[in-house]
Image (spheres, rainbow, N blue to C red):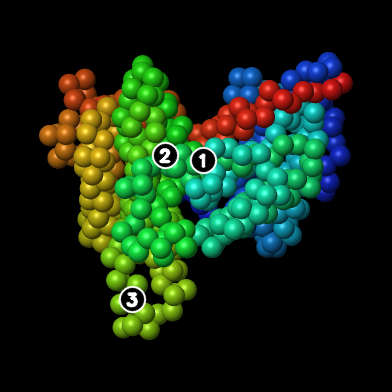
């Protein structure tokens, strides 16, 4: 959903050229981080200079393994030229990263550059073991692999990206940054499901939460917007993209979040149902004769907005609503109703809310969603100013009126920058360039 299909979503030659690299002096700090987000058939990447958090290049490899593979590379540093695109079969993730390396090398930014301090990898599921960014070794890889049963769509692709990058640069720190890490601060009463404890423990069944890098970044930037330290601020973050999640952040620490064991729980999403009576699955198996795999596909890929009205692009849904389409209107109302429930619930969890903040593709761009989500919640101090709400900007901004008791804000997320910062904070000081 774009705005609904946001930048956050789950579901993306050789490297010999070093032309254009600037000469370096001995023991100059290596200050660049390459961020990789490896999906089942795609790789998104960004190269960042951590001295000023600037982006040097970004790109996407998609449809890996198909004849119609496509790589779009965008140099972002001054003087490097414009966007480049190549098409044709890219057989696997190894070939994809080699193609990325070649494009970076053409700009003098190759993966073999001594300026590169580390490669940071988005890893969706870290379980309870990983609450911080972690330098990858064989033991870490084994643990990520052990979590594949609870993240079968994501962790295998993340592992492939890490293993391929290790082969390309075996001397370079590879850092895993976990979507679940920010949510490991949830208290047990928020993280536990009310099922038999022995069964839950034996199969690692609990609420983990996802989109953690976004929730961490946005909650911290919201505190900056308010001119306060994160430890002083309680925030409800609404990450609304094709995948969507809410979090309750108390003093910089997550105390509750809407996604659970998997990214299926919680808000209505582009193709996922969100919260649903578990007995629906039993009913579909017994009465409709559906298999577990068919039910899984239904709830993850054929539900949510697309299941309700056939579209998961919020712009298209709003166009249809404005034209009087009843299915689109009902889908929109269901989406908003679920949002309101979570805003109310997390207000109760936090007790005091300093800000409700919208982020990701829908949250940042769909003014009607923001307006509808807080409409009728004036008793909670929530309102939006009509003029402020319609402003389009890439900057964090307050959209509530001055008189509102609780700030309503839009804070663009930046998961790649968050991954780069966490990666560099972990290994950057130890990396130097030897002349």
CA distance for labels 2 and 1: 8 Å
Residue at x-position 26% and y-position 46%: 342
CA distance for labels 2 and 3: 33 Å
Quarter of image, res 430: top right
Residue 340 vertical placement versus 415 (above, below):
below
Q: Nearer the viewer, mark 1 or mark 3?
A: 1
Tag 2–tag 1 contact (CB < 8 Å): yes
User: Which label sits on residue 57?
Assistant: none
Residue to which mark 3 is pinned: 282
Indicate left or right for 194 with 126 as reference. left
Residue 295, image x, y percentages = 41, 72
Using the rendered image of the protein, determine whether residue 343 is visible from the camera's viewpoint. Answer: no
Relative depth, front residue between 395 and 38: 38
Residue to which mark 1 is pinned: 131
Q: Secondary structure at mark 1?
A: loop
Q: Residue furthest left?
A: 379
Residue at x-position 75% and y-position 53%: 94
Quarter of image, res 135: top right
Using the rendered image of the protein, determine whether residue 169 is visible from the camera's viewpoint. Answer: yes
Q: Secondary structure at mark 3?
A: helix
Residue 292, image x, y percentages = 44, 75
Residue to which mark 2 is pinned: 185
Mark 2 or mark 3: whose residue is earlier in sequence: 2
CA distance for labels 1 and 3: 34 Å
Residue 41, image x, y percentages = 62, 57
Mark 2 or mark 1: whose residue is earlier in sequence: 1
Q: Quadrant of the C terminus?
A: top right
């Amino acid at each position: 959903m774009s705005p609904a299909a946001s930048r956050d979503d789950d579901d993306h030659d050789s490297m010999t050229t070093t032309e254009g690299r600037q000469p370096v002096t001995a023991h100059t700090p290596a200050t660049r981080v390459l961020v990789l987000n490896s999906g089942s058939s795609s790789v998104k990447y960004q190269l960042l200079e951590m001295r000023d958090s600037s982006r040097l290049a970004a790109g996407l490899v998609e449809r890996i393994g198909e004849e119609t593979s496509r790589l779009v590379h965008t140099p972002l540093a001054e003087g490097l030229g414009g966007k480049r695109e190549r098409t044709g079969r890219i057989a696997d993730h190894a070939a994809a990263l080699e193609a990325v390396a070649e494009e970076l090398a053409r700009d003098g930014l190759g993966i073999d550059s001594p300026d590169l301090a580390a490669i940071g990898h988005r890893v969706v599921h870290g379980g309870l073991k990983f609450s911080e960014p972690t330098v990858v070794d064989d033991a870490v890889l084994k643990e990520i692999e052990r979590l594949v049963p609870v993240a079968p769509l994501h962790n295998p692709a993340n592992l492939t990206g890490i293993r391929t990058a290790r082969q390309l640069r075996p001397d370079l720190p590879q850092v895993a940054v976990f979507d679940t890490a920010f949510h490991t601060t949830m208290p047990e009463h928020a993280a536990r499901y009310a099922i038999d404890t022995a069964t839950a423990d034996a199969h690692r069944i609990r609420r983990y939460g996802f989109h953690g890098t976004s929730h961490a970044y946005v909650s911290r930037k919201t505190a900056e917007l308010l001119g306060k330290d994160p430890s002083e601020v309680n925030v409800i973050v609404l990450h609304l993209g094709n995948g969507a999640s809410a979090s309750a952040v108390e003093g910089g620490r997550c105390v509750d979040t809407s996604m659970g064991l998997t990214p299926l729980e919680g808000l209505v999403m582009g193709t996922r149902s969100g919260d649903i009576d578990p007995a629906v699955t039993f009913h579909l198996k017994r009465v409709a004769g559906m298999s577990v795999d068919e039910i899984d596909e239904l709830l993850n890929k054929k539900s949510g907005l697309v299941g309700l009205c056939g579209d998961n692009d919020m712009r298209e849904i709003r166009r249809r609503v404005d034209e009087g389409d009843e299915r689109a209107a009902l889908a929109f109302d269901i989406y908003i109703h679920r949002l309101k429930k979570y805003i109310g619930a997390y207000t109760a969890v936090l007790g005091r809310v300093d800000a409700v903040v919208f982020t990701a593709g829908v949250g940042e761009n769909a003014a009607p969603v923001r307006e509808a989500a807080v409409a009728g919640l004036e008793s909670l101090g929530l309102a939006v100013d009509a003029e402020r709400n319609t402003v389009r900007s890439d900057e964090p901004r307050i959209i509530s009126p001055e008189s509102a008791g609780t700030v309503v804000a839009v804070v663009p997320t930046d998961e790649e920058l968050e991954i780069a910062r966490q990666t560099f904070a972990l290994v950057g000081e130890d990396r130097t360039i030897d002349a």
